[in-house]
Image (spheres, coloured by chain):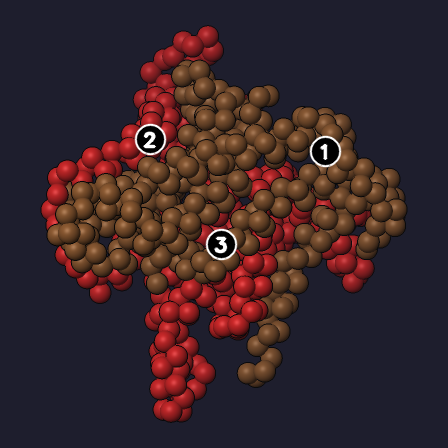
Amino acid sequence: MRKATWLAPTLYILFLMLPIYWLVNMSFKTTNEILNVFTLWPQNFTLENYEKIFTDSTWYNGYFNSLAYVLLNTAISVTAALPAAYAFSRYRFLGDKHLFFWLLTNRMAPPAVFALPFFQLYSAVNLFDTHIAVALAHTLFNIPLAVWILEGFMSGVPKELDETAYVDGYPFWRFFLRIFMPTIAAGIGVAAFFCFMFSWVELLLAKTLTAVVAKPIAATMTRTASTSGYELGLLAAAGTLTIVPGAFVIYFVRNYIAKGFALGRV
Amino acid sequence: MATKTYNPKAWLFVLPVVILVAFNALIPLMTVVNYSVQETFGDNVFFWEGVGWFEQVLHSERFHASLLRQLSFTGIILAIEVPLGVAIALTMPRRGPWVSVCLVFMAMPLLIPWNVVGATWNIFALPDIGLLGRGINAMGIDYNFTQQPLAAWFTTILMDVWHWTSLVVLLAYAGLRSIPDAYYQAAKIDGASGWAVFRHIQLPKMKRVLTIAILLRFMDSFMIYTEPFVLTGGGPGNTTTFLSIDLVKIALGQFDLGPAAAMSLIYFMIVLLLSWIFYTLMMRNEDQ
């Protein structure tokens, strides 16, 4: 039994890769081939779907828009969450436990509940259809998560570190930036990874808060599907390209990923 | 565990987070509360309605039906994903170059935008052009998820298993990696069976991370919207119309703001209540 243990992970990964293979396969086919013949790999290999995406500004701007608000959101969420997580991991203060739970409840708020009020709120403050609007809206669920992850990592650092630094005469901010942050660098990386992930995959709010200027790539895809009939090859190529940034990010954090998913609480 | 010191100034550290989240959470929530107690005939003229909408939603068969579908869906995917995820984590290599390979491949579905997940499964499962659809039909089973409710459920659940089981795997795996080798050696000397190792060494170490996994999977599956919406559009008929899909239909499709707002609040309360129960149980475990 011991020897066959590689079988289960292999089968599982195969199951995960099949739909992705099918998507990539379709992205290299012409629409004609997709609809008329059933082939396991492209018979008339074509790059025209990708060509269209890289030359048409409504398509490639979608990628820049998505990346812009995702990176903006990651920066805001992690920066705001750092001091808060430190406070939760080191101090007791009035209402600390309730505050922590209230933050977490926002991770539980269904985006569908907030879609319409968000539209009205961001229209009212003249931020509708900007990158910053989506970045701010996504902090609703990313800040609680970042605080949760960072608090876990920070609680793993012994308090003696802080105390020694104070005895040595470090002012708080220098201690925090020079000593404490490098100590929990892995935690910051993991928190950033999660913020990137959840902001990148969310569509409902991103779509509700944008129209033209800041429209995310995923919304461009839905528009194409509904207006110009089914250009399946083009859709598959666009879908394939949305997988690429995620794959890149995973590759960079692969050594921390297991610990990160446990939110530092193992 | 070191005891924390009391420091009221810690509030200053928390302030940026509180302001940002309050702006995003409280103002929209107030808007929803506002709508939920009023009636409008357009032109921004509102009339006081009281708790009428809440009563209407709580007694409507449509809401009961979507809630039941939602609970069944969440129950089924938890029952599949948690044991499956643990089983795969147990068989994963513990060290060596294959660890990274497994982790990178397994994490991939987690970083695909949700509508792309739906679109991918749509073209993968379509009976005429999809690999899965063709495959099942070739085995002599009549399968068309756009027309058969059972097939639609099967496809939606399979999609969710594909999308999220890795999260459970990665969490469980993180728990397993924290077990020192000495534990396994001791178990071997004692002649413990595979089941005994699992029950008394591996499961207790995974308990905390598994609670997180169940909590996250519960919350996210309860709010699921984009993937089934793209895959089935809530159909055929209403058979895969989960709570969020139904809510968006009422709010943005029919623009019935009052009932939609009341339904939003009831929906949010259900998630909150169930999550609070999980959270309390989790914290109790950590205190022990």
> Which of the image's four quarters has the C terminus of chain A?
bottom left
Residue at image mark 1: A53
Q: Position of residue A18 (x, y in %)?
A: 69, 57
Tag in front: 2 or 3: 3
Kind of residue indicated by mark 1 = Ile
**Residue B249 visible at all:** no
Q: Callout 3: helix, strand or loop? A: helix
CA–CA distance in space, label 1 to label 3: 29 Å
Distance from Cα at disc 2 to Cα at disc 1: 36 Å
The residue singled out by tag 2 in the image is B20
Chain at tag 2? B
Q: Is residue B39 above or below residue B43?
A: below
Q: Which mark is residue A253?
A: 3
Name the residue rendered at 40%, 66% in the picture: B175
Horizontal and vertical percent position of residue B44: 43, 10
Viewer-proximal residue, A48 or A159? A159
Chain identifier, brown in the render? A
Taking the image as shown, residue A241 lies to the left or right of residue A179, namely right
